[in-house]
Image (spheres, helix red, strand yellow):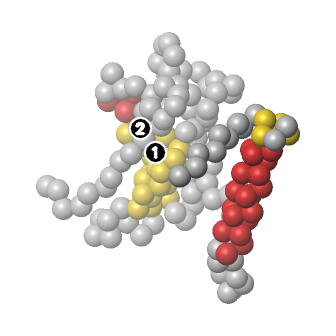
Amino acid sequence: MHKFRIDFVRQNGSPGLVLRGLLLVSLTVGARTALAQPRITKDGTAVVLQDYARVPLSSTTTGKYPPAIDFSNQLGRANRLRSEPPSAPNSSSRFFVNDQNRNLYILDEISNPFTPYINFEEVLPNFVHVDLAAGLGIFNIVSGLH
């Protein structure tokens, strides 16, 4: 068995020839793989993006509560919209929406106002809601609990 020394900096007097060759091969294989993937076809499916509701402004508390609105930071950090279980009253016309800064809102599906449901900073004095996804991020609505 023969072993060949590969010098990635100089091979046969040409700088980077092996690296250029490997790059060319990888780009060729990558392009062929990308082109072999299924393409999006026109089947009548459409997506409509529109403004639906305006989340109330809120800011993180960095000192005294309630905080003043800080327009240089994240305002109204809503990231989840949940429907109630179908057996709940008004489940067909309202959603629950979280604001990572502190609030859980009820959003009326028809008229689109946000109504505060729970302000976690008032209920839980040690509630943490700093930037980078801390705060009220995940919640579930469970039916049948008595």
Which label sits on residue 98?
Answer: 1
Nearest the viewer among 18 and 137 is 18
Q: Residue 58, percent across and down?
A: 56, 32
Q: Residue 132, percent across and down?
A: 52, 31
Q: Residue 98, percent across and down?
A: 45, 45
Nearest the viewer among 111 and 24 is 24
- Figure quadrant of residue 33: bottom right
Which label sits on residue 136?
Answer: 2
Q: Do the residues labelled 2 and 1 touch (CB within 8 Å)?
A: yes
Q: Is mark 1 on a helix, strand or loop?
A: strand
Q: Residue 30, percent across and down?
A: 69, 62
Q: Which residue lies furthest to the front in this view?
A: 1
User: Which comes before the other along the chain, label 2 or label 1?
Assistant: 1
The amino acid on which the numbered mark 1 sits, given as a three-letter code, is: Asn
Q: Is residue 47 left or right of residue 93?
A: right
**Where's the C terminus, which quadrant?**
bottom left
Q: Which residue appears at 47% of the width and 18% of the height?
A: 65
Q: Which residue appears at 39% of the width and 45% of the height?
A: 138
Q: Is mark 2 on a helix, strand or loop?
A: loop
Q: Is residue 109 left or right of residue 24?
A: left
Instruction: Estimate the spatial distance between the alpha carbons at disc 2 and disc 1, rounded to whole Å.
Output: 7 Å
Asked if residue 15 shows in the view, the reply is yes
The amino acid on which the numbered mark 2 sits, given as a three-letter code, is: Leu
Nearest the viewer among 23 and 75 is 23
Which label sits on residue 141?
Answer: none
Dot 2: within a 10 Å radius of its alpha carbon, few (fewer than 14), some, or many (20 or more) residues?
Answer: many
